[in-house]
Image: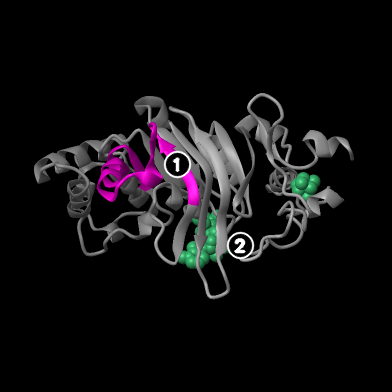
């Protein structure tokens, strides 16, 4: 359904370009929930903004291709792209539940959003929003509310209702459960899963929260330093991680029975100056000489698993 090929999204600065997304390739299959995980700052939001061509200056799309239902979104003219955004692909940006307009009732802002992205009349838009509020488990009275009268979880449900209003085939949700309490998080994860199971929505779920990925997604990509380093089925990623960064990321998830808190050693590098060779070599306990010189290529190792690390493939066999 969605295929991203070697996408590069940079931000210009007086010091040079921040290479925030620097050669990402991945594909999302119809009907699946696909996760994008990785530490804060690894480029998750920049990636989805790049996919939807929502990058604003000083950011720019350096190169790449983004095929959605057979069309390269990076080559479409703005008016055709606008038609696809919302009606075919909808987007829940990071922090959007806090960007509802505080002085407008939900009804006004939700119907305005729909009218702007479709040919619907005000009445039609209102009817659709009413129906979608039901789908996300909110009463129709919410239409008369102002955002401050709703809890964080309810506001996020409103955002999801607006996002699915035009029946998109793909929804991209960036950190949709972050900053909410665990009970609300759990109910939102269930809602997102129901949207796929009951309405056939394909979902791209972006989060730094590995526990959320474990509960929700079917397959996932692990990002590090502007690149995807591993892709696989969620169970395989959690029970049998292959890339050293994935291994450390999984082992740093807090466990009830173990009181010690494990982190990943070292600090994340800057997109202004990625380390040469494998970008993880400055923090990797398995690093070899080759890792400081050559960037590892993405290899398929078993089934659908993809890993970018010199421990695999020809160069790994020599060590
Ligand atoms: N508008 C901008 N101008 C310059 N640099 C930016 C801009 N937006 C993001 N960046 C840089 O791009 C890198 C990736 O940021 P991004 O927001 O995509 O990360 P993220 O993985 O979504 O992080 P988080 O988990 O905190 O949301 C960061 O190093 C950030 O400093
Ligand atoms: S390529 Fe080398 S440095 Fe990079 S993750 Fe693999 S072993 Fe570690
Ligand atoms: Mg982000």
Q: Nearer the viewer, mark 1 or mark 2?
A: 1
Q: Is residue 250 left or right of residue 161?
A: right
The boundaries of the magenta stretch are 63-91
Q: How many marks?
A: 2
| Residue at image coords 54%, 38% | 26
In the rendered image, is residue 130 in sight? yes
Q: Secondary structure at mark 2?
A: loop
The quarter of the picture where the N terminus appears is top left
Sort mark 2 into few (<14), some (14-19) or many (20+) by Cα contacts within 10 Å.
many
Task: Name which quarter of the figure residue 164 lies in.
Answer: top left
Does 301 sit above or below residue 54? above
Within 10 Å of disc 1 (Cα), the crowding (few <14, some 14-19, many 20+) is: many
Element on which disc 1 rests? strand
Answer yes or no: disc 2 within 8 Å of ligand 1.
yes
* Residue matched to label 2: 271
Instruction: Compare marks 1 and 2 and give the one earlier in the sequence.
Output: 1
318 shown above or below 175: above
Q: Residue furthest bottom?
A: 14
The one of 47 and 204 positioned closer to us in this rendering: 47
| Residue 155 image offset from top left, x and y in percent | 34, 52
Work out how far the residue at label 1 is from the one at label 2, CA to CA, in angstroms.
22 Å
Q: Is residue 178 something one can see in this rendering?
A: no
Task: Examine the structure image and report whether residue 84 is included in the region drawn in magenta.
Answer: yes
Magenta stretch encompasses residue 227: no
- The C terminus is located in which quarter? top right
Residue furthest out toward the right: 319
- Kindly identify which residue carries mark 1: 66
Q: Position of residue 316 (x, y in %)?
A: 83, 38
Q: Which mark is residue 314?
A: none
Percent x, y for residue 264? Answer: 73, 55
């Amino acid at each position: 359904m969605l295929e991203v090929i070697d996408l590069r999204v940079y931000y210009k600065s007086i010091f040079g370009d921040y290479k925030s997304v620097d050669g990402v390739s991945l594909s999302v299959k119809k009907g699946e929930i696909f996760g994008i995980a990785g530490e804060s700052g690894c480029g998750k939001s920049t990636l989805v903004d790049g996919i939807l061509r929502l990058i604003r200056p000083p950011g720019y799309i350096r190169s790449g291709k983004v095929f959605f239902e057979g069309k390269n979104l990076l080559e479409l003219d703005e008016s055709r792209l606008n038609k696809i955004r919302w009606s075919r692909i909808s987007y829940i940006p990071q922090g959007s539940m806090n960007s509802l307009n505080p002085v407008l009732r939900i009804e006004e802002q939700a119907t305005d959003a729909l009218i702007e992205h479709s040919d619907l009349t005000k009445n039609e838009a209102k009817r659709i929003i009413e129906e979608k509020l039901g789908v996300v488990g909110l009463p129709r009275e919410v239409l008369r509310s102002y955002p401050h009268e709703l809890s964080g979880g309810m506001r996020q449900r409103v955002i999801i209702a607006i996002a699915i209003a035009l029946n998109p085939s793909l929804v991209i949700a960036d950190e949709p459960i972050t900053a909410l309490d665990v009970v609300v998080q759990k109910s939102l994860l269930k809602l997102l899963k129901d949207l796929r199971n009951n309405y056939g929505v394909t979902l791209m779920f972006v989060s730094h929260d590995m526990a959320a990925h474990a509960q929700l997604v079917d397959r996932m990509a692990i990002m590090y330093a502007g690149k995807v380093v591993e892709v696989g089925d969620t169970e395989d990623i959690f029970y049998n991680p292959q890339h050293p960064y994935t291994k450390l990321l999984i082992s740093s998830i807090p466990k009830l029975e173990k009181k010690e808190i494990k982190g990943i050693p070292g600090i994340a590098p800057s997109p202004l100056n990625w380390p040469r060779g494998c970008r993880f070599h400055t923090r990797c306990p398995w690093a070899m000489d080759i890792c400081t010189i050559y960037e590892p290529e993405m290899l398929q190792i078993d089934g659908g698993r993809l890993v970018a690390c010199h421990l695999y493939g020809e160069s790994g066999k020599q060590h």
